[in-house]
Image (tube, rainbow, N blue to C red):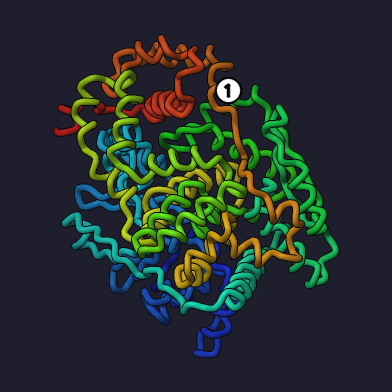
Amino acid sequence: MSDASGRYWIVYNGEVYNYLELKAELQQSGRSFQTRTDTEVILQAFITWGPQCLRRFNGMWAFAIYDRVALRLFCARDRFGVKPFHYASANGQFAFASEVKQLLALPWVGADANRDRLADFFLWGFEQHTDETYFHQVRCLPASHYMELTQDDIERGRCEPKRYWTPGQDETLDERQAITAFRDLLADSVRLRLRSDVPVGVTLSGGLDSSSVVCLAGELRGAGGSQSPLDAFNVEFEGAAYSERDYAEAAASKAGARTIVLRPGQADLRRDWEKFVWHMEGLFETLSFFSNYQIYRLIREDGISVVLSGQGGDELLLGYERYRTYHALFKLRKMSFMAAVREAMAARSHANMPLTKQIAYGLYFTLPVLRAIHRRRLMRPILNHDFFMEYSGRTELLRCSMLHRDRYALQWNEYYHYQLPHLLHHEDSVSMAHSVETRLPFLDYRLLELILGQSTDLLFRDGWSKYILRQAMDGILPDQVRNRTDKMGYETPTGSLIRQNRDLFLPLLARHRDDTVLDVPAIERRFESAEFDQRLLCGVVSYLSWKEAFTVGNLDRQACST
């Protein structure tokens, strides 16, 4: 789209949810509009406010605006990196795209592997933690960053992202005020993300986060006089261990939503594997992403193209079990020894695992030496000897991911490096593969700044996790869901699925016995063993399938260095 003068042109992917409010503000300043789109609002906001417009947007976006007079390109990505922005620059040329495969189609962009990123994945389990990708020539614009490029910048190879937003910390409120403020902000976040020209559905696992979203959406639609029921998509895998139907149905009933149960089939793996790998564009350690791929296909077949999701709630509210250890650690640093002990003892009743396992889990995630020993022991038997010797001593990244000076640093790293980025990458890949747009109410920057300003005691209280959310949802969420202590999500039997499709994966291994990253013959001998860690097995087959799908080259150290 261009502005009326034809000077400014925009290419845009995403949604700015508060575009109506921004449009009204721009109209008051004299701007006129030809369309009803948020695309034109972004364009006019940039013309009016320049790069500062980004701080006014509430949403997810990746866009580029070209100024035909100044011959300047402006590129930007949303605060949390929900929408992807990949780019390549070489020989006086610059290209950008939503997907890596678009860039690989260019004759001057090669599909050479980034050996360092492969090492990060196999040795330490990290994905999407840097602006580099698995492809040597392709980078991604970091979340909360923009770039301004002139022709001279491109010819000189200067691509220098600049940060435009750093999470602030709202004022500390008393408990009742904080709970009320959180409930109001989360409700407003859901309200903004319900804006759509097409029907909006909700993915509903039955967990605390997705159930909160569906119940708030139900209340808002009811208050707005909506007559059509909200579609809530629940997933049920084979076997009771993978069913959360009772919780999901309770939340859907409270929301007045229609529950649609999706049952992905195990046989779908063979049919869809190549397409799935093509869309993922990288490595992964679990087939839960494949389950999501199937889910979005079924959602699209049901006629829904926009859904709300509970993604991001665990990072916002420190919902994973390993965060309990950091909570206790931060208390100890403040000399609150007895408070840390009381919290640990209370967690015996409300945590997702027994106390002894919590302690072991906590040590693993807070002692880099212990985790490094464990990872090396796991990986040495299946990695190429030279590859292992080259990279196994590089533990700086591992230490950075585990040693946090305070809670702000912990959440900063989880949001921008070690947890959220790979979840968002995979979520966008599998949903957009079926042209389904996923909107994430918990990833509203206002919520993060509110939470960062409050005491961690509002996240953990008397052994309960996500205390502030549980209190905020009182009367909105059914108590059987609000008081859940177990955590499941869309769990997928990764190991058994891979082994059930051995005639797909064993030939894959056989074709890559000379791989310079993996010791493939050793992996072949372990393939049928139930002792072979399923995450490692998934990582292996995803890597080899990725190599084939993108005809990846230059995997040996000498080739990469040249």
State the SS at label 1: helix
387, 239: nearer the viewer: 239
Q: Quadrant of residue 483?
A: bottom right
Q: Which residue is mark 1?
A: 497
409 horizontally vs 185: left or right:
left
Label 1 neighbour load within 10 Å: few <14, some 14-19, many 20+: some
- Residue 105 seen in the figure: no
Point 46% across, 47% down: residue: 322
| Residue 273 pos. (x, y %) | 54, 27
The front one of 421 and 208 is: 208
Q: Residue 347: image x %, image y %?
A: 56, 50
Q: Residue 439: in sight, yes or no?
A: yes
Q: Tell me where residue 101 appears, x and y as whole percent.
A: 41, 40
Q: Which residue is rendered at x = 45% and y = 57% of the image?
A: 340
Closer to the camera in the image, 432 or 404: 404
The reply, left or right, for residue 382 in relation to residue 387 is: right
Asked if 110 appears above or below 521 in the picture, the reply is below
Rendered-image quadrant of the C terminus? top left
Q: At 51% across and 85% down in the image, what residue appears? A: 31
In percent of width and height, residue 95 lies at 33, 51
Residue at 61% x, 49% y is 350
Say which of 494 and 427 sits in front. Answer: 494
Q: Is residue 227 above or below residue 397?
A: below
